[in-house]
Image: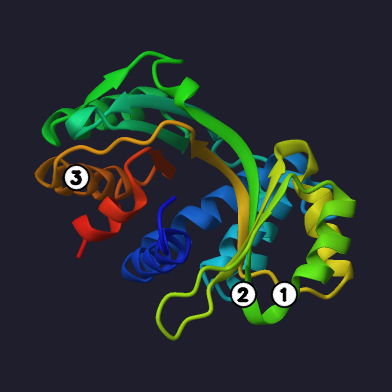
Amino acid sequence: MAGHSKWANIRHRKERQDKKKGKIWSKCSKAIMAAARAGGGDPDTNLALRYAIDEARYANMPKDTIQRAVDKGSGAADGAGFEEIVYEGYGPGGVAIIVDTLTDNRTRTVNDLRYVFSKGGGSMGNAGSVAFMFETKGRVFIEASKTTEEQLMEVALEAGAEDIEAPEADGDEEGFWVITTERTDYHNVRQALEKAEIEVSEGGIDKIPNVIAKPTEEEAQKLMALIDAIEDNEDVQKVYHNLDEDMAAAAEG
């Protein structure tokens, strides 16, 4: 990423979450209930639930709301069964898009998404059509003031972190440390950071693009409008794209 884009991307994502707080919390609750239903209500033994709870906390979801979702999921044996389905496609300017969904009706979900893609100037693709442009990694973001390079090198690298990127200041903001891990090492690194009492601002398993798209400004604006429309679908959990980060931030103003 160029310049201050790592910090800008974090701030940009949080601003988007604030605008859609109600929908974000609803999606978090759904993920928590599905994880608790599948693997039980103890996050210490159910990693999927642990990750879902972490996502909810990063979205500033209240603790009691999180617990209600855990209780509802772990106690709702007769509730609706959800399945995780990943869809792929292209947006305006040929930007690659991956959509993670959690649905109890795959026919409804795929039809709704196909309509949204088409209306937004994109198209659905087959499985694997864009996945090769992304790598699945664990990522952890820590405010610059919460730790030191020496401490992170000792704690994170010892636990299996793949890379540590230094903070990039943006005006008066100090930026974030960005720790990247293999998917299988993410949990160990998170546990090591918690044990060392290093406060994490955000983290999770992400699909990180290894090919960056730079369409025209007009195409970037249409792309972000399409991403918004996809995220509004109640079955959608996460949307990944390979649009240049600075262009994405600029497109939403």
Q: Do the residues labelled 1 and 2 touch (CB within 8 Å)?
A: yes
In the image: residue 206, left or right of residue 13: right
Q: Name the residue under label 3.
A: 220
Q: Determine which of the numbered discs, if any, sits on residue 199 in the image.
A: 1
* Amino acid beneath label 1: Glu
Q: Position of residue 9 (x, y in %)?
A: 41, 60
Q: In this view, does 178 lie above or below 182?
A: below
Q: Earlier in the sequence, mark 2 or mark 3?
A: 2
- Measured Cα–Cα span from mark 1 to mark 3: 34 Å
**Image quadrant of residue 22?**
bottom left
Q: Which residue is drawn at 42% across and 31% down?
A: 211
Q: Residue at x 63, y 76 (%)?
A: 144
* Amino acid beneath label 2: Glu
- Measured Cα–Cα span from mark 1 to mark 2: 8 Å
Q: Mark 2 points at which residue?
A: 143
Q: Which of marks 1 and 3 is nearer the N terminus?
A: 1
In the image: residue 209, left or right of residue 83: left
* Amino acid beneath label 3: Ala
Number of residues whose C-alpha sits closer than 10 Å to that of mark 2, classed few (under 14), some (14–19) or many (20 or more): some
Q: Nearer the viewer, mark 1 or mark 2?
A: 2
Q: Position of residue 166 (x, y in %)?
A: 62, 64
Total labels drawn: 3
The residue closer to the viewer here, 189 or 212, is 212
Q: What element carries label 3?
A: helix
Q: Which residue is drawn at 31% across and 69% down?
A: 19
Q: Are marks 2 and 3 in contact (CB under 8 Å)?
A: no
Specify whether residue 75 is in view: no
Q: Earlier in the sequence, mark 1 or mark 2?
A: 2
